């Protein structure tokens, strides 16, 4: 901001700091008045975390300067230059800064330029905020600024960069950035240049949060929301979150043992809990166990009498007991009473649906953390003791669901997982079969038991008023989609969701989930028609409700599929604005970053998505695929092996692992791929096995398994193209022509939907060149090179194109470029059209041996 002098106030005999404005700042009379007004406002802030302003004066040469208290210490910027702070010290300083800002915000004073150099940390480790109001004055008076922007870019909130009105929430953003810096030593939006940093602040999620403790991440994501309305409204709100996070990290002693205040556990429930509990120690402790059990049963029996007549009091007392404890809650699988096979998917999906509703309470209740259903499932957790041991859950929800005629019965039990005690219990039913209604009632009862406040809109609005049969079909579909990798599950989910939206045409969440199901279907069989179905259902969902994160995520992935990076980025950001902890949206941002050639940031986002859902196999698959695309084979294999640790019967994981081994360990590749199709016949497993056989020149074997792949899905041009290669080498002209016609048709259709897919463009160029359509071939080749100039496969295709067009010189040039960019001689040798080129002495002198 200018020059600061250490000086002595001779009248009052005190050391002070004199801050002069930069000499290039031309201060008009209006600016002087504004500076005086800002200084008067700042001087009125009497708070231990705000630097004291004694006055404002003018030098003999008419330079204005502010007289401030002098503090022994360093700026926070100097402190950070020496290294990362401990989490506790960082939170202590962040809390002090928030207290100072809270005092300022209470008087409607906004700093506008919170940054490490404007925070002094004294010798006693007290944070002092300085320079209140100067940012606006300098921005107004500076002759060098073309627009009146306040703040310093790395700490400016999006609305500041865009020149929009700013308020206290801009200070909240800056403190969020500083908190990340103090904990991790890295700026969450650091980029190599100003333009890239500006883009990141406006469009991308914060990076470098892996080192931020779990208790702190939610408040950081909220403070760094792109839209001000999604942030903490004032620094006081942020202060409360910071204080809670610090308390959670430093932890408090467990509350003393207390009697369980609830209804009696049924003999069946008690037996199950005892069986799942840790085995008691041998010796004297074991001898006392039966006595404790008898006393517990007597106590529970007595409490049951009161429980029958006073259910509301029971919930209130249970809530009082657990009101002060942290609530890490996991919903365990629900029992399908009666073992009705048709109702089994509903029982599976109910765990997800109830987890989703409880998660809606999480943002408002900082002591509540809901374990994702995917983590519960991947750990195969089915009892409270395991939930506490493996997931860190302090509370678990267990229950059962039953359909008897039209009526639905739901039983929900809340259990203290640490002490293996029942906290509360509720039995709900609805004669009409309204599963959504009894589920919402269950959430209300659970909130009371946990002493969690909730408003009417805390219950998922997307499920309110939904037709009972529609909601039941939706829950059933959730059960199928959790393991979409199993053959047939996606089709079963689509059937259930079709029924749901036909019954209730206003069911926005149903349309959104149907769109996601079609996207997953496209992901598994590459039929372009599913993209149109997915997009149509998503558009319908947005028309009905544009506040569903899920639908924006699906639209983001659909735009990714069509290589529309700008639109994909917008949709993922919309999802993160609504829910900053949406792992699928974070993963979508990773794909966008990768397409924009920002691999480091992409990898960070893939890892951040995994951190949000550390035990869901799909995140590791995505990271493994990322490593595969960047030729980091060992790292890719490690990720796919981890997927198999989480889901040992996952055919997709075996297929991915087998594909990764091709060329490195063909025996391991063949074993993994055969295991994939043994677990469940799947087109990816067969198509990868066909590719393995192509690389081994086992043309007949390749043709056989590729036909098995096409029997499951005949809409993927890549499989047809590989079959075409097999028939070319087998000299089977009839089947070669049929495969060529099919490949060509699918390619042209796919190119229409995905004009920015370089591989599609380069493959089309080879077909046009073979047909001697020179202009069309070169146009496609040029498009492919413009989209992906260093892709070795694209370069090999272009070499093949020019060879077919009779331009050997260019064919040699592009084949050499393919090899220089990581392509293999084996790939070139598989191409029938390049055999003459490979025999050319010029190739041998320039190419790899």
Image (cartoon, grey):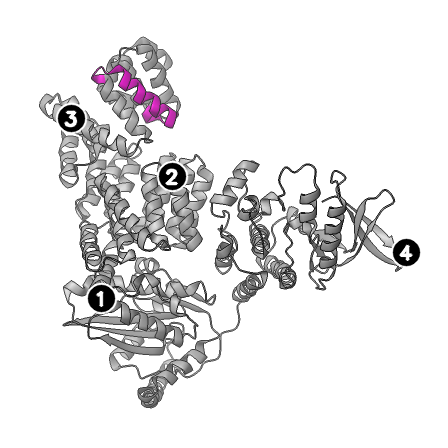
* Residue range highlighted in magenta: 770-794
**In the orientation shown, which residue stands out farthest toward the front?**
30
N-term-proximal mark, 1 vs 2? 1
Q: Which residue lies furthest to the right in this view?
A: 11
Secondary structure, mark 2, is helix
Of label 4 and label 1, which has the lower sequence position? 4
- As measured in the structure, the alpha-carbon distance from the residue carrying label 1 to the one carrying label 2 is 45 Å
Q: Which residue is denoted by mark 3 in the rendering?
A: 741
State the residue position of label 1.
468
Mark 4 to mark 1 CA distance (whole Å): 81 Å
Name the residue beneath numbered marker 2.
627
Query: Within the magenta stretch, is there residue 774?
Result: yes
In what quadrant of the picture does the N terminus appear?
top right
Main SS, magenta residues: helix
- Label 4 near label 3: C-beta < 8 Å? no
Name the residue that disc number 4 marks.
10
Front in this rendered view, residue 665 or 394? 394
Does residue 100 lie above or below 265 as drawn? Answer: above
Picture coordinates of residue 120, whole percent (x, y) = 70, 54
């Amino acid at each position: 901001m200018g020059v600061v002098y250490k000086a002595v106030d001779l009248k009052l005999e005190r050391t002070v700091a004199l801050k002069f404005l930069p000499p290039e700042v031309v201060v008009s009379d209006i600016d002087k008045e504004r500076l005086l007004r800002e200084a008067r406002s700042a001087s009125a802030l009497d708070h231990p975390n705000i630097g004291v302003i004694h006055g404002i004066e003018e030098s003999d040469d008419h330079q204005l300067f502010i007289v401030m208290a002098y503090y022994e210490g360093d700026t926070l910027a100097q402190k950070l230059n020496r290294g990362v702070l401990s989490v506790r010290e960082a939170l202590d300083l962040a809390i002090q800064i928030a207290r100072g800002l809270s005092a300022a915000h209470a008087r409607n004073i906004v700093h506008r330029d919170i940054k490490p150099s404007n925070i002094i940390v004294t010798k006693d480790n007290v944070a002092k905020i300085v320079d209140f109001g100067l940012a606006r004055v300098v921005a107004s008076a500076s002759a060098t600024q073309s627009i009146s922007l306040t703040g310093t870019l790395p700490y400016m909130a999006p609305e500041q960069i865009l020149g929009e009105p700013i308020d206290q929430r801009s200070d909240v953003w800056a403190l969020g950035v500083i908190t990340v810096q103090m904990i991790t030593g890295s700026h969450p939006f650091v980029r190599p240049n100003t333009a890239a940093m500006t883009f990141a602040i406006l469009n991308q999620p914060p990076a470098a949060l892996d080192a931020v403790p779990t208790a702190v991440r939610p408040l950081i994501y909220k403070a760094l929301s792109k839209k001000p309305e999604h942030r903490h409204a004032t620094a006081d709100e942020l202060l409360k979150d910071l204080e809670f996070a610090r308390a959670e990290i430093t932890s408090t002693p467990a509350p003393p043992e207390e009697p369980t205040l609830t209804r009696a556990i049924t003999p069946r429930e008690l037996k199950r809990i005892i069986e799942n509990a840790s085995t008691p120690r041998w010796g004297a402790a074991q001898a006392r166990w039966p006595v404790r059990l008898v006393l517990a049963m007597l106590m529970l029996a007595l409490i049951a009498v009161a429980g029958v007549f006073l259910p509301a009091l029971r919930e209130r007392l249970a809530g009082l007991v657990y009101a002060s404890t942290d609530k890490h809650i996991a919903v365990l699988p629900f029992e399908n009473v009666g073992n009705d096979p048709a109702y089994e998917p509903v029982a599976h999906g109910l765990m997800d649906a109830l987890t989703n509703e409880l998660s809606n309470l999480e943002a408002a209740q900082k002591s509540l953390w809901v374990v994702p259903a995917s983590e519960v499932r991947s750990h195969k957790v089915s009892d409270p003791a395991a939930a506490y041991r493996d997931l860190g859950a302090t509370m678990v929800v267990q229950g059962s669901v039953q359909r008897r005629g039209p009526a639905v019965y739901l039983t929900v039990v809340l259990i203290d997982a640490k002490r293996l005690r029942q906290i509360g219990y509720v039995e709900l039913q609805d004669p009409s079969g309204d599963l959504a209604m009894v589920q919402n009632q269950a959430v209300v009862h659970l909130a009371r038991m946990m002493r969690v406040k909730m408003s009417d809109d805390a219950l998922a609005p997307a499920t309110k008023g939904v037709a009972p049969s529609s909601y039941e079909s939706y829950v059933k579909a959730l059960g199928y989609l959790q393991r979409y990798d199993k053959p047939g599950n996606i089709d079963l989910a689509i059937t259930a969701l079709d029924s749901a939206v036909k019954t209730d045409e206003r069911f926005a969440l149903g349309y959104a989930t149907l769109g996601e199901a079609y996207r997953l279907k496209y992901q598994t069989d590459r039929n372009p028609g599913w993209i149109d179905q997915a997009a149509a259902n998503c558009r319908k969902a947005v028309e009905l409700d544009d506040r569903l994160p899920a639908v924006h995520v699906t639209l983001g992935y659909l735009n990714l599929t069509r290589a529309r990076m700008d639109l994909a980025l917008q949709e993922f950001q919309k999802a993160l604005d609504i829910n900053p902890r949406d792992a699928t949206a974070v993963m979508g941002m990773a794909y966008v970053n990768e397409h924009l050639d920002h691999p480091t940031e992409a990898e960070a986002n893939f890892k951040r998505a995994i951190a949000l859902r550390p035990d869901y196999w799909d995140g590791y698959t995505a990271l493994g695929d990322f490593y595969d695309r960047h030729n980091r084979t060992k790292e890719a294999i490690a990720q796919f092996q981890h997927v198999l640790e989480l889901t040992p019967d996952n055919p997709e994981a075996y297929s991915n692992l087998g594909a990764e081994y091709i060329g490195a360990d063909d025996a391991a590749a063949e074993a993994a791929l055969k295991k994939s199709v043994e677990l469940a016949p799947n087109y990816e497993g067969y198509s990868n096995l066909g590719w393995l056989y192509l690389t081994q020149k086992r043309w007949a074997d390749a043709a056989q398994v590729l036909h098995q792949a096409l029997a499951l899905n005949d809409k993927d041009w890549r499989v047809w193209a590989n079959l075409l290669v097999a028939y070319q080498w087998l000299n089977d002209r009839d089947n070669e022509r049929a495969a060529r016609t099919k490949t060509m048709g699918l390619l042209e259709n796919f190119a229409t939907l995905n004009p920015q897919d370089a591989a599609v463009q380069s493959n089309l160029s080879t077909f046009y060149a073979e047909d001697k359509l020179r202009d069309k071939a070169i146009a496609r080749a040029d498009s492919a090179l413009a989209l992906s100039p260093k892709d070795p496969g694209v370069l090999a295709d272009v070499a093949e194109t020019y060879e077919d067009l009779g331009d050997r010189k260019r064919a040699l040039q592009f084949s050499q470029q393919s090899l220089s960019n990581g392509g293999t001689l084996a790939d070139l040798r598989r191409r029938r059209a390049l055999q003459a080129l490979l025999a050319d002495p010029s190739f041998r002198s320039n190419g790899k041996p």
